[in-house]
Amino acid sequence: MNTELHLYLHSEKERIDSFLKQNPNLFKNYGLNSGVAVIAHLETIRTAYTSGEEGKKEEVKIGEGKLVDMLFIGDVKFRND
């Protein structure tokens, strides 16, 4: 069983703008095949529920905190486990 993890990270606007400027092809293909490594200081992790397939509830973990750093790691092949 898999669980989705959503991250809500606070960061200086300049850091994000600089990252996107340095990596203009990050969103070149719809589907986001580009990998980004994220280092974050999470202050909380909470659980929420969303409606999934056939009306089933699906658990989602939500981590909130501060972005420490991020790094473009290139195109990656995502696994569908």
Image (tube, helix red, strand yellow):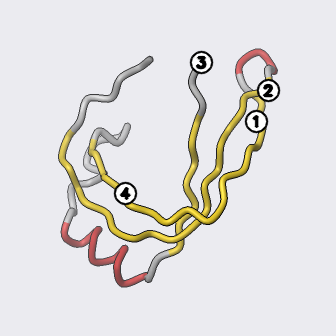
Q: Check whether the beta carbons of the residues at disc 2 and disc 3 lie within 8 A of each other.
A: no
- Decide: is 57 above or below 10: above
Amino acid type at circle 3 is: Met
- Seen in the picture, residue 30 relative to 36 is either above or below; the reply is above
Q: Give the structural element (helix, strand or loop) at label 2.
A: strand
Q: Pick whichever of labels 3 and 1 is earlier in the sequence.
A: 3
Q: Is residue 52 above or below residue 42?
A: above
Name the side, left or right, on which 16 lies relative to 5: left
Residue with the mark numbered 4: 38
Q: What is the C-alpha distance between the residues marked 4 and 1?
A: 25 Å
Image coordinates of residue 69 in percent, x first then y, are: 33, 68
Is label 4 in contact with label 1 (beta carbons under 8 Å)?
A: no
Figure label count: 4
- Find residue 1 and name its label: 3
* Marked residue nearer the N-terminal end (3 or 4): 3
Q: Of the residues shown, which amino acid type is indicated by label 4? A: Val
SS at mark 3? loop
> Which residue was labeled with disc 1?
50
Disc 3 to disc 4, how far (Cα)?
Answer: 24 Å
Secondary element under disc 1, as helix, strand or loop, is strand
Q: Are marks 3 and 4 in contact (CB under 8 Å)?
A: no
- For the point 57% across and 48% down, the residue is 6
Tell me the kind of residue under disc 2: Lys
